[in-house]
Image (tube, rainbow, N blue to C red):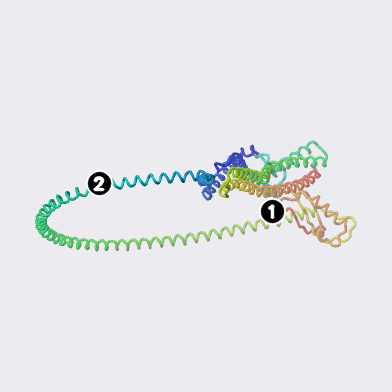
Amino acid sequence: MFSELLRHPRALVLSVVFHVAIIAIGFINFDFSDKTILVKQADLAKTVKAEIIDQQQLEQQKNKKQAKAEKRRKELEKQKREKEAKKRKAEAEKKKKAEAKRIALAKQKAELAKKKEAEKKRKLAEEKKRKQLENQKKLEAEKQKKLAEEKRKQEELLAREAEAKRLLVEKQKQEAEKRRLAEEEQKRRQQELNEILKAEETQRRLDSLRQAYKLAIKQKIERNWRQPQEGGKMPDCELRVLQGPGGIILDVSFGTCTGGSPTYRDSIEKAVYKAEPLPKPGDPSLFERELNILFKPGNKQ
Amino acid sequence: MANASIPVQLVLLILLLASIFSWALMYVKRSYIRQSQVEARTFEGRFWSGINLTDLFAQLSVRQEKRFGLEAIFENGFREFARARKAKLNDNAVVRSAHRAMKVSMSREIEVLDNNLSFLATVGSVSPYIGLFGTVWGIMGSFRALAGVQQATLAMVAPGISEALIATAMGLLAAIPAVIAYNKFSTEVDAMVIRYENFLEEFTGILQRQAQSPK
């Protein structure tokens, strides 16, 4: 098996590629990540351990917990007292600081009032300037707008002209295309007609060849026929002749041959075998394995 | 799959290889059978086109490439026929020796057609069992792990069993195409055998007639 496969490495490669693709698709649809499985196992181990802990251990743990709570409560009280003392100190300091702050604030307020006055004046001057500038800008913008409008109009005109030109060109093109198509159609039709004529021609040729072939076979058989001695009835006979490559006779059988005596039939069969090899057809495609021949003894005399 | 036990992994590997080889073999066989069918059709067309047998033989023997199928049968038969006739054997012996030569050539052709089809049959019938073995082994492992704990839950064994079932799926996946291909190919090969035999008998009849005609 391997030798045959090694002779066709392409098949092996194709097969491997196919499997890799299938496995890839399988992994995408069906995520067998090991993570989830591992996590679940870890959880399970924990719960199991917890269950196993016994009663004694539980009591010990309870005692320990109580002692711990007592200790903690004491510590908390101590901390509270210390905190209060600190608080009082801090408040006194705070009062002092607030007084100082108040004085500073009053000073600052006076300064601020002065500053505000100056600011107001400055703003008024600025406002005036700004208005002047705006007016100028407006005028300029209007001018530019007018200019742009004119330009746009001109451009539009140009575009329309170009469009008209383009349409004209397209129309011409379409007409040319139409003409070309019509010509092609005409050509095609002509060709088809020619082909049909040709086919008919060959068909006719083959038909005539076939007739000639059949006639040649029939004549050869009839030429080889010798009339049997003992007269009797000699009707027309239908023959079925099977021939092999090269015109070899393979089998002869009789169709309707009413009234023909055995000797008569025998003579016909002999004639067929004598006619071997049967004549060749003019065209190889006309060869027929099975020939149906109507034998007429009348032609002989 | 990565934490499956080694036997299960081994089973999966075997099944993968079996599947790869059977697909490659299917490809090779399919193309060869198609080729033989086309060859038989074209040769039969030529043979029955009324061409002279000597001409046909001459055309065939000029060609360089290796002949197979009907061409090989015809060539061997006709060569033997010509040789025996030259040796002035009597008509019966001539035909008999040609017939024998063709029989030998035919059985050689059939052997090539039939070659390795049994591998597909083997894969088709055995790989489900291999897959099943992998699954059983994997489930065994899962249950053994379960025996060690006090509180058993389904969640503990389910991943293992699911993994083990992959082996069965792989086995079926390898087996189904192999069985289909085997059935298809064996019927096609049978049809080819009948075709060859028919040709052989017809050709023998023709040779018999030729032998009786004057030399």
**Residue B105 location, quadrant:** top right
Q: Is residue B69 left or right of residue A116?
A: right
Q: Residue A84: horizontal and vertical position, in percent? A: 27, 48
* Chain containing the residue with disc 2: A
Q: Quadrant of the C terminus of chain B?
A: top right
Q: Residue A281: horizontal and vertical position, in percent? A: 70, 52
The CA span between labels 1 and 2 is 127 Å
Secondary element under disc 1, as helix, strand or loop, is helix
Q: Is residue B157 above or below residue A147?
A: above
| Residue type beneath disc 2 | Lys
- Residue B211 is marked as none
Q: Residue B203: horizontal and vertical position, in percent? A: 75, 46
For label 2, the residue is A86
For label 1, the residue is A286
Q: Is residue A182 left or right of residue B190?
A: left
Q: Residue B39: horizontal and vertical position, in percent? A: 66, 46
Residue A198 visible in the displayed image: yes
Q: Quadrant of the N terminus of chain B?
A: top right
**Among numbered discs 1 and 2, the one appearing first in the sequence:** 2
Mark 2 residue crowding within 10 angstroms, few (<14) / some (14–19) / many (20+): few
| Residue type beneath disc 1 | Leu
Secondary element under disc 2, as helix, strand or loop, is helix
Q: Nearer the viewer, residue A231 or B167?
A: B167
Q: Residue furthest top?
A: B87
Q: Is residue A136 above or below residue B128?
A: below
Residue at point 28%, 45% (across, down)? A82
